[in-house]
């Protein structure tokens, strides 16, 4: 099974408190967006890659276009609205992978694992969650939480969802993977997150 990937890079990134757009922040010398695009490109089960930008990230959009990456520009009115708009613009009426542009340790192997798991679970969506206690133990921020089977988790932002279902009203039957693997554990919301991630992953990338 192959699915298209949407790399979400249109958020305001206000918590990072930087004049640099968050997708362009350097992580161990390389922009975050470059690392995520490289991971998606290395995945065997990703058919196409789109970077979703908005009015909030014009410099990110410029970099993507310069590098020849496909871009879907949205209104920048929030995650769910932007996701719906990107799915419509890209005519993505089948399962689609969503990835935030702030996961520096993401790999193609991890992406392929998620796609395979989605196919095996047979639901219309698969969400990847991180135990709250793991983020807190690492002194990492928690920007978004969600409940699954009565337990609250940190949201990783990595999901697969049937494009047809997200455009329709009603609840979507969702499977989940709960993991503290580094590929999704270190998402960058604040400058402190960036510093902690660089410290912990420096040897991983050396």
Image (cartoon, rainbow, N blue to C red):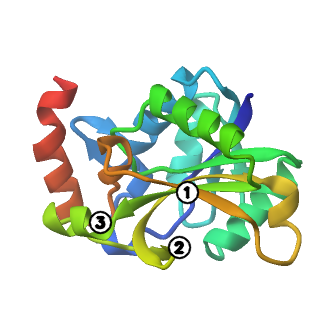
Q: Distance between the residues labelled 2 and 3?
A: 37 Å
Which x, y percent locates residue 26? 28, 44
Mark 1 surroundings: few (<14), some (14-19) or many (≥20) residues within 10 A: some
Q: Which of marks 2 and 1 is in front?
A: 2
Taking the image as shown, residue 162 lies to the left or right of residue 64, namely right
Kindly identify the residue that appears in the image at 52 percent across and 21 percent down.
Answer: 42
Pointer 1 residue: 176
Query: Is there a contact, CB below 8 Å, between mark 2 and mark 1?
Result: yes
Q: Would you name the residue on which mark 2 appears?
A: 149
Image quarter of the N terminus: top right
> To which quarter of the image does residue 134 belong?
bottom left
Q: Nearer the viewer, mark 2 or mark 3?
A: 2
Res. 124 image quadrant:
bottom right
Please tell me whether mark 3 sits on a helix, a strand or a loop: loop
Marks 1 and 3, the one that precedes in the sequence: 3
- Whether the residues at callouts 2 and 3 have beta carbons within 8 Å, the answer is no
Q: Residue at x 32, y 57 (%)?
A: 188
Q: Name the residue under label 3.
A: 18
Give how far across and how far down residue 140 sits, in percent.
22, 65
Label 2 – label 1 distance at C-alpha? 10 Å
Kindly state the secondary structure of the residue where label 2 is placed.
loop
Element type at marker 1? strand
Q: Where is residue 23 in the image (x, y as percent from the top left)?
A: 43, 51
């Amino acid at each position: 099974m192959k699915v298209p990937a949407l790399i979400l890079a249109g958020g305001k990134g206000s918590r990072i408190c930087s004049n640099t757009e968050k997708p362009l922040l350097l992580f161990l010398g390389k922009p975050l967006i470059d690392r995520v695009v490289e991971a998606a490109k290395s995945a065997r089960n990703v058919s196409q890659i789109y970077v979703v930008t908005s009015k909030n990230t014009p410099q990110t959009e410029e970099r993507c276009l310069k590098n020849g990456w496909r871009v879907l520009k949205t209104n920048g009115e929030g995650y769910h609205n932007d996701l719906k708009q990107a799915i419509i613009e890209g005519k993505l009426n089948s399962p689609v992978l969503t990835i935030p542009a702030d996961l520096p340790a993401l790999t193609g192997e991890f992406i392929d694992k998620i796609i395979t798991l989605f196919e095996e679970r047979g639901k219309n969506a698969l969400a990847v969650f991180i135990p709250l206690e793991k983020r807190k133990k690492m002194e990492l921020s928690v920007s978004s939480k969600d409940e699954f089977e009565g337990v609250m988790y940190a949201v990783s932002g990595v999901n697969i969802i049937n494009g047809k279902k997200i455009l329709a009203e009603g609840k979507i039957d969702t499977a989940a993977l709960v993991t503290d693997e580094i590929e999704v554990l270190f998402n960058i919301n604040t400058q402190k997150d960036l510093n902690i991630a660089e410290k912990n992953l420096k040897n991983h990338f050396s």
